[in-house]
Image (spheres, grey):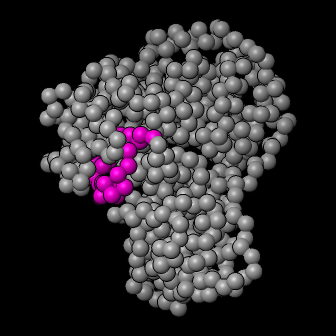
Amino acid sequence: MKYSGAAITINLLERQGIEIIAGIPGGSNLPLYDVLHQSRIRHILTRHEQGAGFIAQGMARSTGRAAVCFATSGPGATNLLTAIADAHMDSIPLIAITGQVPRPMIGTNAFQEVDMLGLTGPITKRNFFVRQARELLEIIPEAFRVALSGRPGPVAIDIPKDVQTEMAEFDLWPDPGVRQSPGPGDPGVATKAAEMIRAARRPLLYIGGGIIAAECAPALRSLAEKNSIPAVSTLMGLGVFPHDHPLFLGMLGMHGARHTNRAMEEADLLLALGVRFDDRAIGRAGEFCRHAAIIHVDIDGAEIGKIKASNLGLAADAGCFLAQLEPLLDRLQRAGWRARLATLRENHPLRLPAETDLRHPAGILRFIANHLPADTILTTDVGQHQMWTAQAFPFQRPRTLLTSGGLGTMGFGLPAAIGAALAHPEKKIVCISGDGSIQMNLQEMATLAELDLDITVIIMNNNHLGLVRQQQELFYNGRYAASRFASSPDFAAIARGYGLFAVNLGESPHPGESLVAALTRTGPAIVNAPVDSAANVFPMVPPGGANHEMIDDVTLDLTGKMG
Ligand SMILES: Cc1ncc(C[n+]2csc(CCOP(=O)(O)OP(=O)(O)O)c2C)c(N)n1
Ligand SMILES: [Mg+2]
């Protein structure tokens, strides 16, 4: 057989089962597009490469499968970097394939030349520069294997234009790259963990995105139920427990409920699974869970002991560990500990506005939850609206909250929603955005209009960079530098300009009805929701503070301890 580098690439992507690629063509990847044009793979033309990166992420995050984006060299490639870094922080299997200037021109500052190998090194799991067309036969399957195995993550592949056109002769197509089954992990650790759990009186599970990546949410719930171990979750772990599960205590950390963070203070054993002790979750590390022994299990050995020393650590797949641990645990009620946690919840509840309060993002979130099926996928942008989504929306299942956790990238929400809708055409997708964030990838409204997907975007419009404004109010003595927009666009008019259906709740005589109409119609809808610009997300751990130093609108005690 004899194929060009471009044909080898597209063929191998087909063999990997890739059905959709998002991207933008340009001089350096035209040979790839020329072959893609004949392929059964569907191409989604975005309006910015960052949009393509986040569309691929939306597909990957909502399915757990690897997804692909394309960009040309130079500015096309650099426009992908934020989406690649974002995938790296949240362990998302993204394959970013960029065109590069022809080999003889490399290193000459050729038109649209940029060193992608150098730029993507720190933000990928692995990156490749393809020197010859035949190397693609190894590199493409290897890229998928790396992206999906162990701790998932992004892989970048940079292909010079003349490698795309170079012909290579070979006999056999390689097998597709697949996720390698994780090793079972040391069974001795499970035995030791079971002993520690048996000796504990107030154990807690601290779970995160690793449980979703390992697809072991059902195993985790049944282990928790068997031994009555209550659970707290990071932002990335929301959905692993249904929000109203009797053992679920909610999200911990910077914007967690007071009773959730307080429970951590009282625990004597922490079973940390698929988590990395991120600062937004644990606050000041030295003071996190001061009275608890820690068992830490994560697929990435580099995370064990990185931030917080553990009494027992294991680099293993969470699902394999749970399978070893479950038979070793007794059926227990732990009535005393659960009663204590119920009292904490009663005394320190998360106070949210009522679902009739459509001038508050949390009210809107509670309201829409009543009109959406339990498996609705929500994407968010980054800001106050993101934290209110985490607090107020009753997530029921894994992979129903797609949010930029580690990098916190404004502009994530709309393209990620497009990706989720492409992967789940039968589902309604809702994007919760902010008036700041939506403008960071606003151009993808054109892509949405073209694709006519079943997406409702709700822009929580407080005319501010709200989370910044909040920090300035609380920690910079009300010096509001660059957090208020002096002018605000008419988002509904803009959306209509893109050819989308749009409503402005501020102009609607019956906002609730307009919101339901936007949610229940099939096809895209953009909702501008004017909300109170003075509202703050509470409770809040001051940046750099310990979780027990939470403040809220009642205490507003910047130095005080948790009441
Ligand atoms: C790309 C990017 N730039 C800057 C920030 C810093 N930042 C975090 S939240 C925020 C404000 C977001 O405003 P908006 O989308 O309106 O959400 P709100 O907080 O008002 O709900 C900013 C600027 C960021 N997270 N991402
Ligand atoms: Mg805002």
Q: Is residue 469 magenta?
A: no
Dividing the picture into quadrants, the one containing residue 504 is top left
Name the residue: 80% across, 43% down.
185
Asked if the magenta segment contains residue 452, the reply would be: yes
Quarter of the figure that contains the N terminus:
bottom right
Q: Is residue 439 above or below residue 185?
A: below
Foreground of the two, 20 or 563: 20
> Which residues are the magenta region?
427-454
Residue 64 x %, y %: 59, 48
Which quarter of the figure has residue 207?
A: top right
Q: Residue at x 32, y 38 (%)?
A: 521
Residue lying furthest right in this view? 188
Position of residue 443 relative to residue 140, above or below, is: above
Camera sees residue 474? no
Relative placement, left or right, of 428 versus 171 is: left
Can residue 392 be seen at all in this image of the molecule?
A: yes
Q: Pick the residue in front: 4 or 443.
A: 4
Q: Position of residue 71 (x, y in %)?
A: 45, 70
The image shows residue 158, relative to residue 536, as above or below, that is below
Residue 228 in which image quadrant = top right
